[in-house]
Structure formats: structure tokens, C-alpha cells
Amino acid sequence: MKDAIIELSVKRLQTEGLRFSLDSLARELKVSKKTIYKYFSTKEELAVAIYRRFYGDAAAKIAALLESKGPLSEILSVYSQSFLMKKEEIFNKYALNEAIRTYTLSCHEKLWEQIEPLFPEDIRGAARAIIDGAYEKACASAVPPEKITDCLIKIIC
């Protein structure tokens, strides 16, 4: 149950942002809020678990894709999901917001460090500016990140 709570929480936080609530999470899991609090004594404890899971999974996915020489589109897709997890509005929801924000930004940076060697050294800074800018805009608009990734791949390749 603990894993189910975390997995669904990651999805809900990415899609709903501040509208994400324990009430809606409990409803979707068909459990009571009391059950969620059995596994996570506070919302902040759940928030920490959400971010640890997300970034652990994201780093592992990127590492596996890099090792198998997976498509750049899949690598960027994983990276783009990190932007949904670091939207500024999310951090206002938790008492541990500064600790979670710092952790998130550090993990996001580590994801880029995994990806960075895919680009020629002389354009890495520009590639990051373009990629990050595109995903940041996607988070603030109705444009799906997949469309941004497709467009980036056409431009880069």
C-alpha cells in the first residue's frame, strides 16, 4: 500500500499541482485518509517520500536508457517530468518547502548531469538553455511536454 500511495501521489502532484489533496488520493485508492496516515504520519513525510521516489526512479530510467543507447526522445521525456515536480507553486503546499525545494533542485541538476554528455561540449550550455526553457514554458502552458520533446528532437537531430 505504501508504494501505491507514493506512485499515485507522484502522478497526481504532476498533473494536479496544488489541487492534489489527501482526500482525493484516498478516494482514488479506495482507502481512508487514516490509512494514508498509517504509512505517512504527516503530509510533509509523504512529500519527502514522493520526491525521493520520483528522482530515484528518474535517475535509474535515464541511466538505463543511456546504457542501452535508448532514444534521446525517451531520455528527454524523463527529464521533462522533472519540471512538473519542481514547479514553484508546489512547494508552497508543504511545511518543509525549503528542504524539499533544495532537494528537488539538486536532483534535477543531477538528471541534467547524466544527460549532458550526449551533447557536444561546445554547445552544452546552449543545449541546456534551449531544453530547459522549452520545458519550463510547457509547464506554464497547455502544450504537452511530449510535443515539446518531439519538437526538440527535430531541432537537435
Image: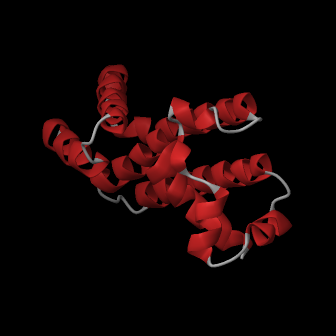
- At x 21%, y 39%, the residue is 152
Q: Position of residue 105 (x, y in %)?
A: 59, 31
Locate the C terminus by quadrant. Answer: top left
Residue 34 sits in quarter = bottom right
Q: Looking at the image, which is closer to me, 90 or 119?
A: 90
Q: Position of residue 2 (x, y in %)?
A: 73, 71
Q: Position of residue 66 (x, y in %)?
A: 42, 54
User: Colour mode?
Assistant: secondary structure
* Residue 66 as seen in the image, left or right of residue 3: left
Q: Position of residue 94 (x, y in %)?
A: 71, 38
Locate the N terminus by quadrant. Answer: bottom right
Residue 3 sits in quarter = bottom right
- At x 44%, y 52%, the residue is 15
Q: Looking at the image, which is closer to me, 40 or 58?
A: 40
Eyeballing the image, is 125 above or below 2? above
Eyeballing the image, is 121 above or below 64? above
How many labels sit on residues?
Answer: 0
* Residue 141 as seen in the image, left or right of residue 53: left
- At x 42%, y 35%, the residue is 116
* Residue 115 as seen in the image, left or right of residue 74: right
Residue 58 appears in the picture as rendered: no
Residue 100 appears in the picture as rendered: yes
